[in-house]
Structure formats: C-alpha cells, structure tokens
Image (cartoon, rainbow, N blue to C red):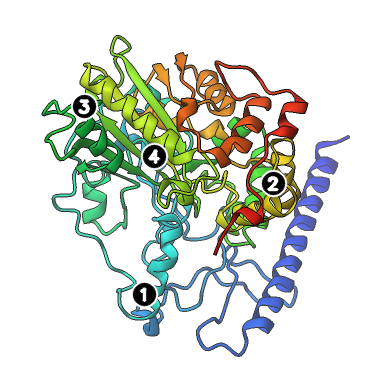
Amino acid sequence: MSEAVLAQILATLADLKTNQQTLSDKVDKMQVDAALKDSQFLKVDHYHSAGQSDSDGDTVASPSYDALASLGGVYTEKPILTTYVGQKGVKPSRMVWGASDPKTRGPVVVSHLASQINHRNAIGAYGGPYSIYRSLAVAMGDLPADYKPNFENTEPPIKIKQQPQWSDTSKIVSMDPFGHLTSEYYKSEIENGLDIRPTIAITRAHMIVPEFQDEIKNGTMHVDGKIFVNETGELNVHKAAVDPVWFLPGVAERLNVEEDHLRRSLFEVTGGMYPELVTRPDLKVFLPPIGGLTVYIFGNHEQLSDPSTRLTVRVHDECNGSDVFGSDICTCRPYLIYGMKECIKEAQNGGVGLIIYFRKEGRALGEVTKYLVYNARKRGGDSAAKYFERTQNIAGVKDMRFQALMPDVLHWLGVTKIDRFMSMSNMKHDAIVDAGIKILERCPIPDEMIPPDSKVEMDAKIAAGYFTTGSVPRDEDLCRTVGRDWDAFHA
C-alpha cells in the first residue's frame, strides 16, 4: 500500500470521527436545550474545540466566561456541563502525582469559578459531600460564591514528617499526602487567586470517654499526666481529618479494574454527576462525594514511623447506632472502646496508639440499608446461619467497604509495622499485609464485651473467616446462634 493511499485512509477515518462527534454533540445539545428551555438560569451550552462546526454548519463556541450576575458574577454565563481534552482555553494546573517535591507535584485545583474553571486539574469539589451544603448556602445568599477561606493560624500543631511512601504511587492513591500543608506549599498560587484548599486538617484536643472515667475510678486505668492528663479522665490526643482524594489510575490498579471501566461506573452509578470522568481522561484526580476518615494519635506521633517503637492500631468503620447511641445488635462501640483502651495503655508504656475511624456506615451500604437488613433479620428469624444472606438479599453484596484503599493513611503516617492489631477482620488484616505492613499480633474482642444480641454477627463473621483465638462455629452451631425477635422488643 502506497503512502498516499494510507494517508487518504487515515484522513477519511479522521473525518468520520469528527463527523460522529459533531452529530453526537448536536443531539446532546438539542436534548439539553429542550429540557431546560423554560429556565432563566440554566441555559446550557456544550463546548468543544474552537472553530468546530456542527451538522448545520454553525460554529460551536469555546467556553464563554462572562459571569452570571444573578450568582454574584463569578460563574460562567451559561452552565458548562463538561469539558473536553484539547478544548480551547483549557490549561489544567500542573499535577504530577507521586512527585516527592510538593511544588513539582502541584496543588489539587477543582474550582468551578469562571476565572478558574480552565485551570482545574481534578474532578469533583472540595469538601466531598459537604460541598452540597456549601451550594445551599450560596443559593440562599448566605455565602458568596467566590468566598476564599482565610487560612491564617490554621497550620497543624505537629509536623507529620514526609515519608518515602508519599511519592510511591503504589502506596498512596486515595488521599493527598500534601493535603495538610497547602497554604504553605502553594502560598504563591493562592495569593495569585487560585482557590486551593486543604484536604487534611490536623489539630490537638482533650477527649473524655465515660467508660475510661469509670476505669480510672476503679483503678483499672491510671492518670499519668501525659496521656490521661488529670483525674477527670481527660485524654491528650492529636487528630487528623482526611478527605478522600483519588488518583484514579492507582485506585483502578488497587481494585484490579481498568481505569476506563472505573470512570464509567463512577459516572453512571452517581447519576451522571461528574461527566468529566468520561470526557476528560487527562484529569487523573477525583474528589469523590463520600465521607473521609479521622486519625487519633495517642503518644508521640514522631515515633509512628519508627519500627523499634511498639504500635497498637484499631481500624474502625463508622457505626452511628452503636458508636454514638449504644445499640447492642453489634460489637462496634465495645470493640472501639477496647481498641482505644489498648492504644492508651501502649502510649503510657512508651509506645504509640493509633485509631483510624472511617466514615463507612453500615459496611459502606448506608444506614437506610442497614436498618432494612435489621428488619429482615428480626422478622425472618435472626440467626448466624442467615446473617450475611439477609444483607445480600437487600444490598446485593455482603460488604462494600473494599478495604484495599484503607492502608493509604498508614503509609502517610510512615507505619511499616503494627505490634498489636485490634481487629478480627480478615479483610482489613489482608489489605494491610498486602500493602507491605507487618502485623505481629491480632487481638479479638474479649468475650465479656460482646453484647448478647451481637453474638449472631460475631459467630457469622468468625465462620466466614474472621480471626479468633477460640473455636470456629460449624454450620449447626450457626443455626443455634439466634438473636432477639420482635416479641422481645417492648414499646
């Protein structure tokens, strides 16, 4: 085949691709305009490459950044539903995920303001699910749409030393390791107008836990002046709040899926909330609208990365009913309290204690689903033999916490070895070990701390692979482990 023929074929294919995209754009624009034609605020344009013509010969505009006065003059005149790779004017701020130097790595920029939309290098919004409440405040006029936070005096009270794991794209893919120091590393960018916000905040606090106050009174825990600072049981703790920041190629690899498939699934299942997951494959960072995590450090934080220092860790997934309100259908609060107690003891003995609290309510199925499962369990005969079946019938899966991303925060803290792991979960254990972190001892919850009605859950989990130092229930044992039925509840 001659070069001329090959060139002609390639040119024809390119024309076909362009024509297909143009037709798709036209149909898309007609559908949107028809749906929104009666709205004075939502006149929508789709924007593509400059100078591109649609099927009627009309030139499709590049983004127009004339601000909409009714929203404070800070957004584009017409909402931009999505952007595309190579679009005129789109110049994402530099982002090199995995770079060890924060200036080389670059900040996470997600602002949708007219002055900054071209510079975004990430998908989503700062604050995750709380961005919705921020939207309400803007809509009601309580908050200027272009409000820029004043970060004076917000710097961390302690220094989390940069670790080699911060620049290892196989170690940290679900959080920004530089997220707590954005106002320091990217001060000049912020002063020049970019809306860059922290995704990690570190502070120090005193905590009071009623169970520990009782133990101090009973003499089973003691005041040392450093961890327990006084006889009222006040605990000295450093804590960090972490919002999720996903590096999509790394997340896909961690979950063993293709990045394109992950992006499409995120786009579709969230109701098309983030079209740039599909239209902007060049944007590799996503701030998902989900809860993050909180780290509680007991003892000297600088020793977290020292393998010669003993470390006790509890990784806990949120359970509002038990953790806060004391529901006895599960072991969540008892195990959390037990984990905290052992972390405190470790710190008092010269080691470090670490609690990592994830916002994954109801095994990341949500509290509505969890309560539906409770109803099905109690009405259908609550036994350990049918424990997971009840969940799977409603949610389609037994568990959606997918612990593969969980170890990232341990890497951020420089943890390479855990002496005592206060968890029976095989999924958490395996995810941490697979991440290259050693676990020397696994500690189950003591039998005396297990509420009677939670035996159903506990026996089912042990039979399914949870760690235990006791016997593993057989099938006939699971049928005999039953919880309360509705008749045991009283108004």
Q: Nearer the viewer, mark 3 or mark 4?
A: 3
Mark 4 nearby-residue class (10 Å; few <14, some 14–19, many ≥20): many
Image height check: is 43 above or below 125?
Answer: below
Which residue is at a point 81% across and 37% down the rendered structure image? 3
Q: Closer to the N terminus: mark 4 or mark 1?
A: 1
Q: Closer to the N terminus: mark 1 or mark 3?
A: 1
Q: Closer to the N terminus: mark 2 or mark 4?
A: 4
Q: Find out whether the residues at labels 4 and 1 contact each other: C-beta distance under 8 Å.
A: no
Could you say whether the residue bearing mark 2 is in a helix, strand or loop? helix
Quadrant of the rendered image containing residue 384 = top right
How far from the left and from the top, in percent, is residue 39? 56, 87
Identify residue for label 4. 176
Which residue is at a point 82% across and 41% down the rendered structure image? 6
Q: Closer to the N terminus: mark 1 or mark 2?
A: 1
Q: Find out whether the residues at labels 2 and 3 contact each other: C-beta distance under 8 Å.
A: no
Q: Nearer the viewer, residue 320 or 453?
A: 453
Identify residue for label 3. 219
Residue 360 tag number = none
Give the Cα distance between marks 2 and 4.
Answer: 33 Å
Give the Cα distance between marks 4 and 1.
Answer: 27 Å
Amino acid residing under circle 1: Val
Could you say whether the residue bearing mark 4 is in a helix, strand or loop? loop
How far from the left and from the top, in percent, is residue 175? 42, 39
Identify residue for label 1. 138
